[in-house]
Image (spheres, helix red, strand yellow):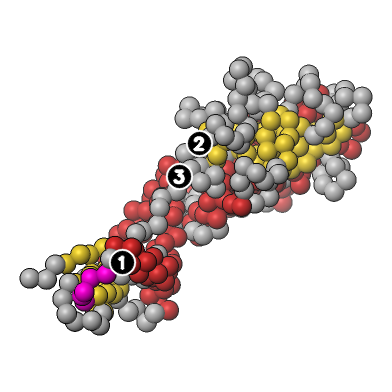
Amino acid sequence: MSKINFKFVKLEQQLSPNIVVDKRSDVVKYGTDNMFPQQLLDLSVQSSLHTAILDKKTKMVVGEGFNYTGGNNKKTEDFIKQVNPYENMNDLLMKCGTDLEIFGGFGLQVIWTRDKKSIAELYHSPFQNLRSGKVNEKNQIEEYFYYDDWKRYTRYNDTTAIKSFNIEVDKNGPQLMYAKKYSATNMYYPLPSYVGGLNDINTLYEISVFHNACISNNFQPGIMIVFRGPRPAEDAQDAIMKALSEKYQGAKNAGTPSVFFLDDDQQEPMIKPTQTNNLDKQYDTLTKAVKESVIMAHSIHPVSAGLLVGGSLGGGKEIVEADEIFYNGYIKHEQAFLLRYFNKIMDINGMKELSIINTKQLDVELSKEILTRNELREKYGYEALEDGTNDENEVVVEDEPTTIKPEKIIDTNGE
């Protein structure tokens, strides 16, 4: 009787946010392979739903940029208009807001004035290029490391060490204000708000790739490859498997080959197509379940995410209400987190406290000026008043424009 030895092509590994502290290196690994931020960055443009939600979050968080109250202040205005020779504060806000929504944190490089009494310039540091040093005896991180391609990094590579932001010491060179939210799972790196949905987001991407590959391959099924004896040695089998994996592995090949080694006299391999029933229904069911998981991970209402809900028309009123809930439950807290760090800078420089202008505030104020009462009600999905009241000067929206108040920074290490 012939002996059968069969193997399956190994599937791609799941995303891993594990933190690895290597005693031989000063750099703390961000993910098992130190490439978790790059995985998040790649994922941000691979799933249409995930990309759209990230874009909506970022636009709502940064709003229309910075503002301040308390009268005109030239010093504050000049700093906002030019925070470094190349950018203004709103440019930094957009970049930091984008990083915050993708990675769960952001980095600001701080340059002190010559007298070390105030901050002269701020620069955005790409978050995916930053890695943490180890904590000291006080459980504080004293330095971070910058490198433009961590995939090529070894402990012998030259990285740029940047001292952690500190108002008391080490003001001679650049400092890094590393903004991250507290995480009970690790003290070094943040996790994105959608961390619980990483595999679901990746699954959406793989489903899209699979369907695209099916079309490209004329909807051909997966294949089964049988090698007939004499059966090669284990190392030869592994070499064959590696070659097949590189060629056929992943959703882009729309089918994973199963490889069998048979111990008999027939030399030539046999290749057979594998059939799977009801693939269309399976993928429809999977896609629906995965989209729901992604939306839940982002803490956003399906209507705000651009998806219709059963029994819902997705009208103006529903969108406004969903966005209002999302703003109060998520966006304003993200804005407060950003303002904690930017207003720390403003406080050191003796400048006015910043706030973020929300797009909704401008829309409401503009609407009040150019639309009648019933036009406003129609805009936001409400029925017109039956008494015919349509006073252009009547105040319709009762909510006063609000600004996001920053939280206080507790320490100088961005913890």
How far across and how far down the image is residue 13, in percent?
40, 53
Q: Badge 3 is on which residue?
A: 16
- Mark linked to residue 237: 1
Q: What element carries label 3?
A: loop
Query: Alpha carbon of mark 3 to alpha carbon of mark 2: how far?
Result: 11 Å
Q: Nearer the viewer, residue 300 or 4?
A: 4
Residue 393 sits above or below residue 288 on the image: above
- Tell me which label, 1 or 2, sits earlier in the chain: 2
Q: Are marks 1 and 2 in contact (CB under 8 Å)?
A: no
Q: Badge 2 is on which residue?
A: 20
Q: Do the residues labelled 1 and 3 touch (CB within 8 Å)?
A: no
Q: Is residue 230 located in the magenta-colored stretch of the structure? A: yes
Residue 308 sits in quarter: bottom left
Query: Alpha carbon of mark 1 to alpha carbon of mark 3: how far?
Result: 29 Å
Q: In this view, does 343 lie to the left or right of 121?
A: left
Q: What element carries label 2?
A: strand
The residue at 51%/46% (across/down) is 33
Q: In this view, does 158 lie to the left or right of 247?
A: right
How far across and how far down the image is residue 407, in percent?
65, 24
How would you rate the neighbour count of disc 3 (Cα within 10 Å): few for under 14, some for 14-19, many for 20 or more? some
The residue at 34%/53% (across/down) is 289
The residue stretch that appears in magenta: 228-232
